[in-house]
């Protein structure tokens, strides 16, 4: 497989023949990473955010081991990592709801920009997060 060539004019691969879209005309997809103390807590948060159309879906990865600094000490904990798929326009609302729903004093919310993906999937993602 050869590497893709990107064109600045369209933000699209010059050899885009694989059914993937790489332009910015879609719903401005984002992936939000959110960790929590356990599967049950993260499942409740994920279900709430899907029901409220703030995220299209979530993958919950149980068994993540986190190492972090908290209140001056290095800590370790088993956590559940949530991989939430959403759109740029929903990030502020997600952050607000996390402050309300999440048990941590400082809930993790790291947002990654999606630069490409399956056009049908990105369209579905956008449809699921529209009120």
Image (spheres, rainbow, N blue to C red):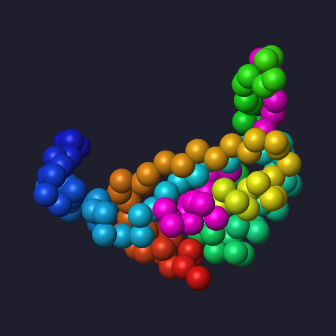
Is 76 included in the stretch rendered in magenta? yes
- From the viewer's perspective, tell me whether residue 117 is left or right of residue 124: left
Is 65 included in the stretch rendered in magenta? no
| Residue in the image at 74% along x and 30% along y | 65
Magenta highlight range: 74-93
**Closer to the camera in the image, 68 or 43:** 68
The rendered magenta stretch, by its main secondary structure, is classed as strand
Indicate the quadrant where residue 78 lies. Answer: top right
Image location of residue 43, percent across then percent down: 79, 59
Q: Is residue 34 above or below residue 74?
A: below
- From the viewer's perspective, tell me whether residue 30 is left or right of residue 60: left
Q: Is residue 24 above or below residue 82?
A: below
| Residue in the image at 58% along x and 52% along y | 32
Image location of residue 46, percent across then percent down: 73, 62
Indicate the quadrant where residue 114 lies. Answer: bottom left
Image location of residue 17, percent across then percent down: 20, 62
**Closer to the camera in the image, 102 or 115:** 102
């Amino acid at each position: 497989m050869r590497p893709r060539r990107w064109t600045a004019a369209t933000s699209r691969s010059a050899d885009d023949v694989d059914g993937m879209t790489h332009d910015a005309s879609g719903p401005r997809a984002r992936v939000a990473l959110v960790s929590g103390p356990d599967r049950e807590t993260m499942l409740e948060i994920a279900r709430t955010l899907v029901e409220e159309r703030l995220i299209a879906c979530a993958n919950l990865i149980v068994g993540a081991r986190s190492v972090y600094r908290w209140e001056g000490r290095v800590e370790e904990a088993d956590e559940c990592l949530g991989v939430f798929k959403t759109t740029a326009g929903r990030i502020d609302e997600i952050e607000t709801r996390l402050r309300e729903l999440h048990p941590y004093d400082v809930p993790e919310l790291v947002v990654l920009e999606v630069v490409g993906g399956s056009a049908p999937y990105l369209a579905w993602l956008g449809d699921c997060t529209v009120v």
